Image (cartoon, rainbow, N blue to C red):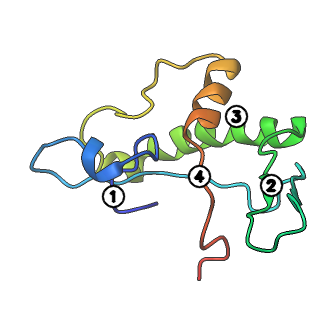
Amino acid sequence: MLDAYVGDQQNPYRDAPTTPVQYASAIAALVAPLSLGKVCINNTSASDPPIINPNWLADVRDQELAIAAPKRLRRLMNTLVSKKVVIGDEIYPGENAPSNEEILKNIKDSRMTVYHAAAT
């Protein structure tokens, strides 16, 4: 749980709702993905950047976990304990993305890397 509005990961400060209440974002991360990316040397010059292909969510098992994550987070936010502090409806992405395809598209459009996967 982050004590901030995250939204689509593009610019949470710019895109945050302008209301006088505080926001929290329930987020999930794949900390041991099975999709493999690669880094390739572009040419013989060490000053040229490498070609990086993270290949995020290429493995179908990663896709399945990524789709299951927001569903689990919604269940968490609908518990009696969470309902005591939640005011209003889900803002982003909203509960109107019912199909797995729409959920996966939303995740692909808004993914980001994880900096503290081990809670450091």
Q: Which residue is mark 4?
A: 112
Q: Is residue 53 above or below residue 49?
A: above
Q: Indicate the amino acid at tag 2.
A: Ile
Q: Nearer the viewer, mark 3 or mark 2?
A: 2
- Secondary structure under tag 3 reads helix
- Secondary structure under tag 2 reads strand
Gap in angstroms between the C-alphas marked 3 and 2 = 28 Å
- Whole-percent x, y for residue 105 in the image: 64, 26
Closer-to-camera residue (80/109): 109
The C terminus: image quadrant: bottom right
Circle nearer the N terminus (4, 2): 2
Q: Which residue is mark 3?
A: 67
Circle nearer the N terminus (1, 2): 1
> Disc 4 vs disc 2: Cβ atoms closer than 8 Å?
no
**What crowding class fits label 1: few (fewer than 14 Cα within 10 Å), some (14-19), or many (20 or more)?**
some
Would residue 2 appear left or right of 106 to someone viewing this image?
left
Would residue 3 appear left or right of 49 to someone viewing this image?
left
> Disc 1 vs disc 3: Cβ atoms closer than 8 Å?
no
Residue located at (59% from left, 52% from top): 112
Q: Indicate the amino acid at tag 1.
A: Ala
Q: Which residue is mark 2?
A: 51
- Whole-percent x, y for residue 34 in the image: 90, 52
- Secondary structure under tag 4 reads loop
